[in-house]
Image (spheres, grey):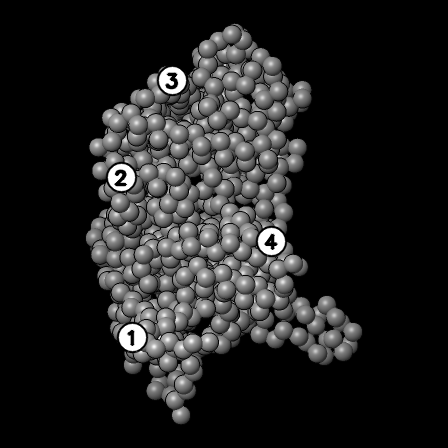
Amino acid sequence: MTQSLIPATECPIQIEDDRTGMSVDTLKRAFADNLFYLQGKYESFATADDFYMALAYTLRDRLLNRWLKTFKTYTENNVKVVYYLSAEFLMGRHLGNSLINLHIYEKIRQAVEESGLNLEELLEREPDPGLGNGGLGRLAACFLDSLATLEIPAVGCGLRYEFGIFHQTIQDGWQAEIPDKWLRFGNPWEIARPDQFVEVKFGGHTEMYHDDKGHFRVRWIPSTTAIGIPYDTPVPGYDTNTVNPLRLWRAEASDDFNFDAFNAGNYDGAVAEKMRSETISKVLYPNDNTPQGKQLRLEQQFFFVSCTLQDILRTHLMHNKSLHNLQESAAIQLNDTHPAVAIAEMMRLLIDEHSLDWDTAWRITQNTFAYTNHTLMPEALEKWSVNLFGYLLPRHLEIIYEINRRFLEDVKLWYPDDKGMLARLSLIEEGPEQYVRMANLACVGSHAINGVAALHTELLKQDTLRDFYKLWPEKFFNKTNGVTPRRWILLSNPSLSELYTSKIGNGWLKNLDELRKIEAYIEDPGFREQWDQIKLENKRKLADYIWKHNGIGVDPNSMFDVQVKRIHEYKRQHLCVLHIITLYNRIKQNPSIDIVPRTFIFGGKAAPGYFMAKLMIKLINAVAEVVNADPDVRGRLKVVFLANFNASLGQKIYPAADLSEQISTAGKEASGTGNMKFAMNGAMTIGTLDGANIEIREEAGEENFFLFGLTAEEVYKTKAAGYNPWEYYSKNAELKAVIDRITSGYFSHGDKDLFKPMIDSFIHHDPYMLFADYQSYIECQDQVSKAFQDREGWIKMSIKNATRMGKFSSDRTIKEYCEQIWNVKPVPIEVEEYNQDTAVLKVAK
């Protein structure tokens, strides 16, 4: 072989690390190596899951370099970190999101295809981590994406549920729950950190004593102790080197195995403690209809909170001499009331474990915590029986009583003549049984309280938390929720994303307001045709999915009328069903009637113990069974319930929707984020003036939003005046015909009792005002049908909805939190190029 005569300095050889290199050849080699060395398979024996795992490890390697550099930068600069505490993190699949955030989607596609595989098929092999149920958990996931994209130091903190939210199947029209075995084949994205374990106490009793300086102290003597093991998952930002961790905690027993019990033949007893402890992180949201279920929920909440706070204090003390300046290194956000016990746990740790005095500990606690409220319904504000709380967390109950005593003493001074205020503000609800009010605890122990939409925040001030607002108006903020455009447009709707970028560049992905530039093309017939074809193709893909999973053929040219979200009475999926039956009745009365073809698509899970929500699912499927098979309908109406709605299914549904149903009773929905995802993908919204609907309507323009129904104020006044749903039923012929068809057993094979609980609730109570809003809703839906027939007008409305949603990027929401509540700033991360000389291990002696 002839040697090169060119000096090496003039012809440097570029060496790529197999774990960080981004060329297609390097990616192919890394993919093959991971299949062989991590999965232990030749390609001829590998399954699709093996190929997916190998590809996931290939991506994780490329995240780890950025992740470790991010951690090192934060540590060396002692930066302030946001800790986002949430019982749910509905992250969605990691692989596709990581590919787009690292800008290597097309390179990976090429590497995979040149290896003889299909990337889309591998993406579908990833289980959807069901660590949440609906908006709360998905919001937390969007926030983590935005925090990393904006280069904000942050950690998501929660529980590593072995079984996530149940896998939903439909059996004879009813919801059936089976375990969500998302960890069945392992999780390539997480890294266990057993060396960073913490101990968490439960039960027992407390003892009073004086320390060696003569100070009064309390010692908690627990009856049981569990071990918390952290598992870290990398969350990359888009177009940045920042990779923040999602830290989820798994419960283990302090003693896994009892040798004495085993040797005595008590084999179950030998592992009893292990089983009891591991139950804590076993399943998301265990049914709390039993005392045992309630106790487990409280155990779960306290467990991940205690693990997280101990971890925060340990991290702080590694770089600071004392805890007095904790608020300078940590901003702790409580995502709803689930983690509110953190207020009491922080006080316990500061006073009992770190020997601070009460006033100092309370100042640190209040300055460190902030609280997000996600509900307007008083019955949804979490409360715990004092008996259960004291049994499980005796020291924390003492601390809460002391917080309450001091707080109410202040209230007496501020408002000496208002005795009712004391009862309303108290952390303890009096009655036949006493309860600890977790929302009150969060309000008292935090320096900031925020709602999640403009209306929601105002109603918190005026109603739900009005007394706290009267005390501390300066604590209240509005932070209208947002969603990440990277997952919900770029990943979910690549064709639309390509159209945007071809016209205005890709700056919109980090500044969604730039999409307004697209309106310059709205009068271009060619652009509108492209827009319409993208929507039609997305509908065809969803139609294929429906045929494959439901066996129902739907027409992509029909209007896709969609309502996918958690099943709940206040969200009023059943109001949409009343509309379907109304249209069906019209067809039965006049089979030749001209009706705009519609495909009604539902999806969502009902809580296992929520009978009425499960009955709603049964009603949807019962109506679907009749309508879809009736020859009089002739395909003009189709009804579909898509089982097991989750983030990944949402990525198929949102881009395909023509009409987004956001029809909650006004004043009940805190925000809603599904409405944002639909609108961003060009769906029209039919909705009430509720939650973020109001702001979406303001941004899109009133003429591009289908509004119906009572306002929150009108709902209140109607109920106060003695709302009588029977009058609406008896005076509205179409409504009466709809209800009568249900009660006749028409949709239940002649069983007149099946839907009786729901109909009785409508006629005699109707707490969510379906009958009051029915006529307005039907008339508005008729307007929707008329608008849909004007194709050019509909496309223009679609474009305006999609391009005017810049306000609803979670990037905007996070910027507001950073500036007004957390007081944190971006920390850019620099990653060095691969250098072979520095790529070897050199341990300092």
Label located before the other in sequence (1 or 2): 1
Label located before the other in sequence (4 or 3): 4
How much space separates mark 1 and mark 3, taking CA atoms?
A: 68 Å
Q: Residue furthest right?
A: 265
How much space separates mark 3 and mark 2, taking CA atoms?
A: 28 Å
The answer to whether 557 is drawn above or below residue 271 in the figure is: above
Which one is in front in this view, the residue at disc 1 or the one at disc 3? 1
The residue shown at (58%, 20%) is 627
How much space separates mark 2 and mark 4, taking CA atoms?
A: 38 Å
Label located before the other in sequence (3 or 2): 2
Percent of width and height locating residue 735:
48, 16
Percent of width and height locating residue 842:
41, 85
The answer to whether 513 is drawn above or below residue 550 in the figure is: below
| Amino acid at the residue labelled 2 | Lys
Percent of width and height locating residue 425:
33, 51
Which one is in front in this view, the residue at disc 3 or the one at disc 2? 2
Q: Element at badge 4? A: helix
Residue on which disc 4 sits: 48
**Which numbered tag is attached to residue 10?**
1
How much space separates mark 4 and mark 3, taking CA atoms?
A: 45 Å
**Which numbered tag is attached to residue 503?**
2
The residue shown at (25%, 41%) is 504
Marks 3,2: beta carbons within 8 A: no
Asked if one can make out residue 618 in the rendered structure from this viewpoint, the answer is no
- Looking at the picture, tell me which residue is in the foreground, 98 or 734: 98
